[in-house]
């Protein structure tokens, strides 16, 4: 694990996403006014969704920039999750191309294409999928799981190649965090969790 004071790739990703979806929101409002009727209302609804993406990236940026030293963890999803993400990306990309070239709705089509890229970057972990901060974990969307919310953790060997290890952490009987980590990240994470007072627990208990 390599500590960084500034998660460059993830911050850059959210800056680009914020600018892109902000531009899409304004473009979609213009397109809705030109279309009118039901199609215009649909474009306006998607403009609101694009604004939601802007808010999501803004929250993630604030959370990442406010964090202290971060350690990027090599997290990965299960193979089935990757297949679902690829299918979703494919459908969004096809819809986007259709809207741009067949329906002459470039704003809505661009939003679909941009959302496909965003989904791929997050879902396929093209940006780091999990960070270890001074006070807890932060995912690429800026959501925090603080050490104060946890009591125990466990590691379990996962299937597949390259080898992954399933990290689970929770409080009482409640599971608060689950992530698949690269094998070389385990020792550093275990040491940090022990240092903040969490108790190791056998998998499945």
Image (cartoon, rainbow, N blue to C red):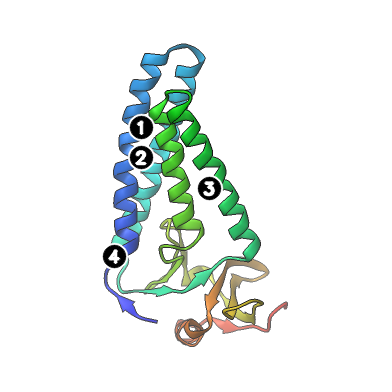
Q: Quadrant of the N terminus?
A: bottom left
> Dot 4: what SS?
helix
Q: Which residue is mark 2?
A: 21
Residue located 41% across and 43% down the image:
114
As drawn, 107 above or below 119: above
Percent x, y for residue 170? 59, 70
Residue hosting label 1: 25
The correct choice, above or below, for 152 with respect to 87 in the image is below
Query: Answer yes or no: do the residues labelled 1 and 2 have beta carbons within 8 Å?
Result: yes
Across and down, in percent, residue 89 comes to 53, 47
Along the line of sight, the residue nearer the viewer: 129 or 81: 81
Secondary structure under tag 2 reads helix
Q: Are marks 2 and 3 in contact (CB under 8 Å)?
A: no
Q: Is residue 153 visible?
A: no
Badge nearest the viewer, 3 or 4: 3
**Looking at the picture, how far across and down is residue 84, in whole percent?**
62, 53
In front here: 91 or 74?
A: 91
Residue furthest out toward the front: 101
Mark on residue 8? 4
> Does label 1 or label 3 sit earlier along the sequence?
1
Query: Alpha carbon of mark 1 to alpha carbon of mark 2: how far?
Result: 6 Å
At a point 37% along the width and 49% down the height, the residue shown is 57
Q: Earlier in the sequence, mark 2 or mark 3?
A: 2
Q: Earlier in the sequence, mark 4 or mark 1?
A: 4
- Give the residue displayed 43% in from the left and 12% down from the top: 36
In space, the residues marked 2 and 3 are separated at their CA atoms by 17 Å
Gap between marks 3 and 4 measured at Cα:
25 Å
Report the Cα–Cα distance between label 4 and label 1: 26 Å
- In this view, the mark in front (2 or 3): 3
Q: Residue furthest top?
A: 37
């Amino acid at each position: 694990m390599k500590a960084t004071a500034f998660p460059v790739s993830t911050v850059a990703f959210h800056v680009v996403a914020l600018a892109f979806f902000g531009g899409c929101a304004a473009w979609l409002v213009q397109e809705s006014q030109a279309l009118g009727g039901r199609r215009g209302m649909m474009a306006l609804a998607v403009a609101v969704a694009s604004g939601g993406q802007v808010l999501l990236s803004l929250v993630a940026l604030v959370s990442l920039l406010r964090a202290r030293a971060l350690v990027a963890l090599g997290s990965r999803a299960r193979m089935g999750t990757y297949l679902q993400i690829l299918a979703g990306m494919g459908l969004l990309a096809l819809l986007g191309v259709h809207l741009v070239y067949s329906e002459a709705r470039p704003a809505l089509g661009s939003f679909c294409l941009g959302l496909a890229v965003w989904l791929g970057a997050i879902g396929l972990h093209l940006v780091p999928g999990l960070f270890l901060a001074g006070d807890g974990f932060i995912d690429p969307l800026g959501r925090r799981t603080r050490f104060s919310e946890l009591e125990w953790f466990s590691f379990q060997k996962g299937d597949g190649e390259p080898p992954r290890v399933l990290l689970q952490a929770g409080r009482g009987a409640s599971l608060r965090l689950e992530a698949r980590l690269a094998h070389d990240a385990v020792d550093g994470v275990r040491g940090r969790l022990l240092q903040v007072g969490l108790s190791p627990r056998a998998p499945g208990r």
